[in-house]
């Protein structure tokens, strides 16, 4: 079967499949996973891909965890290729070696994002250049061999105007100077992410900026019962144990809609609970307790 994705209309832009909830790093902006640490079984993954292929334009190998830790990553990629489901990948990039680079150049990948902000968050005193050089080497190859592949260098640690983080700004500047030197570009030093988050570096390579956010948690205070979200309209998530959740920020499965081992995915996302959540979002009504505590929702106002 061809790895060229279908152009037919799909209900969802993205399905987030958590192939592993294990990460090789622990970033301050990314809360620790409380659930049992696990890798997704290849057979379960194939069952999921078979079911979501008609539903989604692409899948991510991420909800929590670092996808490059999965020992059978190549099999998962080949599964997506067989079912013509494009992959959107997010990685911290610290595990990027030659073998992983070869895998990520597979034509089934549509977009690859490197979360550069994770490096200094874990290694504040270390020289970032060896880390960046591995990413630059892959990027140079991708720009030449896969000019159709979208690439993002993420710095999602910008300070809110009311809480400047001078240390983070200094480290970001150090990375930006290395990026500018390698790609012979100039990156603006002031970014208003409310207007534009991306800066094109060349081809389909972009810098992508954003501010940090607080992950929703049942322990946080209720912010309100009014608001909207793209969960269940543009995307939904499937945790490593097969639990379907309405949103990519439900990292602990606080809103379980069902398990793919027990029920078809189409039934799960059309269940009474899922329909109520979606109808609520359309009418700016937050029915779920976790949604009422989600600060990210305020970005859609």
Image: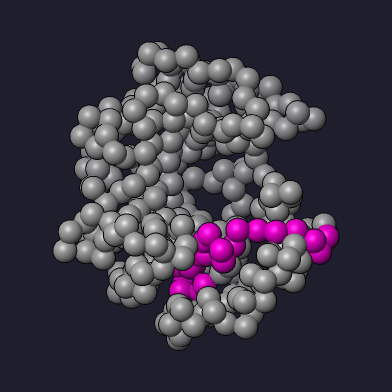
Which residue occupies the extreme bottom position in the image?
262
Where on the picture, by quarter, is residue 99?
A: top left
Q: Which residues are magenta?
A: 224-244
Q: Would you place residue 288 above or below residue 89 in this image? A: below
Name the residue: 29% across, 59% down.
6
Identify the residue shown where x is 35% and y is 53%: 87
211 drawn magenta: no
Q: How is the image coloured?
A: one colour
Q: Residue 44, located in which quarter of the rendered image?
A: bottom left
State whether residue 54 is above or below residue 155.
below
- In reply to whether residue 241 is colored magenta, the answer given is yes
Considering depth in this image, is 123 or 89 the residue closer to the camera? Answer: 89
Task: Give the image location of residue 144, x and y in percent.
Answer: 22, 29
In which image quadrant can residue 201 be found? top left
Whole-percent x, y for residue 137 in the image: 28, 28
296 sits to left or right of 61: right
């Amino acid at each position: 079967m061809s790895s060229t994705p279908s152009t037919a209309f799909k209900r969802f832009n993205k399905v987030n499949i958590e192939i592993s909830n294990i990460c090789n790093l622990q970033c301050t902006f990314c809360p620790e996973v409380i659930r049992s640490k696990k890798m997704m079984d290849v057979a379960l993954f194939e069952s999921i891909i078979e079911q979501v292929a008609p539903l989604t334009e692409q899948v991510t190998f991420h909800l929590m965890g670092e996808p490059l830790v999965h020992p059978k990553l190549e099999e998962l990629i080949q599964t997506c290729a067989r079912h013509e489901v494009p992959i959107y990948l997010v990685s911290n990039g610290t595990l990027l070696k030659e073998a992983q680079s070869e895998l990520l150049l597979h034509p089934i990948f549509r977009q690859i994002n490197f979360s550069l902000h994770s490096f200094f968050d874990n290694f504040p005193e270390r020289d970032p250049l060896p880390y960046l050089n591995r990413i630059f080497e892959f990027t140079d190859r991708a720009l030449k061999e896969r000019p159709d592949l979208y690439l993002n260098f993420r710095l999602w640690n910008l300070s809110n105007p009311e809480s400047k983080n001078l240390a983070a700004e200094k480290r970001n500047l150090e990375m930006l100077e290395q990026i500018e030197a390698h790609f012979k570009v100039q990156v603006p030093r002031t970014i208003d992410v409310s207007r534009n988050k991306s800066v094109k570096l060349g081809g389909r390579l972009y810098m992508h900026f954003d501010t940090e956010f607080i992950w929703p948690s049942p322990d946080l205070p209720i912010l309100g019962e009014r608001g909207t979200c793209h969960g269940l309209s543009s995307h939904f998530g499937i945790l490593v144990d097969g639990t379907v959740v309405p949103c990519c920020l439900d990292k602990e499965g606080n809103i379980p809609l069902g398990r793919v081992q027990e029920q078809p995915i189409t039934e799960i996302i059309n269940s009474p609970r899922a329909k109520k959540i979606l109808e609520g979002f359309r009418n700016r009504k937050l029915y779920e307790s976790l949604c009422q505590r989600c600060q990210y929702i305020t970005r859609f106002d």
